[in-house]
Amino acid sequence: MRKTLLVNRRSALKLVAAGAAALSSPYIIRPRPAWAENGVLNVTTYDKFLPQDFLDKFQKETGIEVRVRLTDDQGKQYNLLTAEGANPSTDIVTVAGHRYSQFIQSKLISAIDTDKIGNWKNLNSVYQDAKWARVDGKLWGLPILAGYEGLARNTDYVKEADSLEIMFDPEYKGQTSYIVSDFLTLAMQYLGYDGDFVSYTDNRELAQKATNEARDLLIKNKDMVRKYYDAGSEVQQMFINEDIYLAHSWSGPVAKLIMEGHPIQLSAPKEGTFGFVYTLNIVNNAPNQENAYKLLSAVLADPEVGASMTRQSGYSSTINGVADLLNDREKMAATLPQNQLERVIFFSSVNRDMKNELVDRATAEVKAA
């Protein structure tokens, strides 16, 4: 998710056939059912993001035929929209918040009018006017699902993990693990710096200083780490084998362990942590814009929709009231207490080139030390 793919108009046109073929599911035009009286709506999204029972109900109540095309990558959506230009074949796409600038600068998505989303108030306040979601003073999408990173622990051995300080506690020497590049930005937060680099746009010197100090902290505490990992399956297996008791992890791998009954829990440290949000975005020049707004409003109409999204995708819902519909294990796997949710800093699209450059270099230096 980190590298930005830049495609000009000419190269994108060459990629359109490959880009369309690469989407996870073919775009099939079927005869319109008898109840489809109010047009169509074309949605490009990820598998299991929009529950089928929700879509069935929406179609029945509105008379709008929803055509879903599945994707598995942000770049594929970008390439296809770029190639299609002013005549898009989709009305709604699913963009991660930290990729906004790429889509906005290329004029591929439109700012949304929250007055047209009748159930906007049902969106959790953390997401309603989040800084990451606002570009040029405008909002650009409806947040639907969130993932975040934090401190994962085996609750049989680690009773509490409210601060990143615990990752440097000698009590857990050789029993911790993390993804170096991601934990390095949390180490910046721990040291009082800006791990998302948003405030360093015009101050590369300070950005370099902050990155270097976090790098040195990780090198100094390298003996705390049993293993650096890259894939979620690795940290899962280390927890299952009890090779580690404490780790930095994204919410997805931890949620799976919790749902399988393992004594694992994830918390957002008080110094702050990072997350990303998937949003439903209306395409610029969308041929069925009015229908798109109806779908966005319908997503927020009932927390059961958010609960179903969470159960299917493994990500946390952005909709108020969802936690009340989940059982205790589902809550532990897919939600954070509101006070911890407010600690999550959602990735911004600002200054990502500098961030990627400095973090990638520091990551290599930590691994080589």
Image (tube, rainbow, N blue to C red):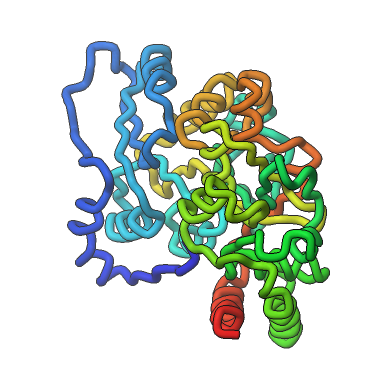
What is the count of numbered marks?
0
The residue closer to the viewer here, 78 or 309, is 309
Q: Residue at x 56, y 79 (%)?
A: 367
Up the image or down, 217 lies above or below 330; here it is below
Q: 280 or 324, which is in the foreground? A: 324
Quadrant showing the C terminus: bottom right
The residue sitting at 64% across, 37% down in the picture is 263
Q: Quadrant of residue 54?
A: top left
Residue 3 drawn above or below residue 251: below
The quadrant where residue 267 appears: top right
Q: Could one spot residue 292 in this view of the protein?
A: yes
- Relative to 170, residue 308 above or below: above
User: 137 and 150: which one is in front?
Assistant: 150
**Location of residue 166 (image quadrant):** bottom right
Q: Nearer the viewer, residue 21 or 81?
A: 21
Q: Position of residue 38 (x, y in %)?
A: 34, 20
Left or right relative to 17: residue 296: right
Please give the name of the residue rendered at 74% of the width and 84% of the height, measured from the top-left corner.
Answer: 209
Question: Percent x, y for residue 70?
Answer: 32, 41
Residue at the location (42% across, 46% down)? 283
Question: Residue extending furthest bottom?
Answer: 205
Q: Judge left or right: residue 165 versus residue 265.
A: right
311 on left or right of 17? right
Measuring from the top left, give residue 128's x and y in whole percent.
Answer: 69, 40
Decide if residue 132 is in sight here. Answer: no
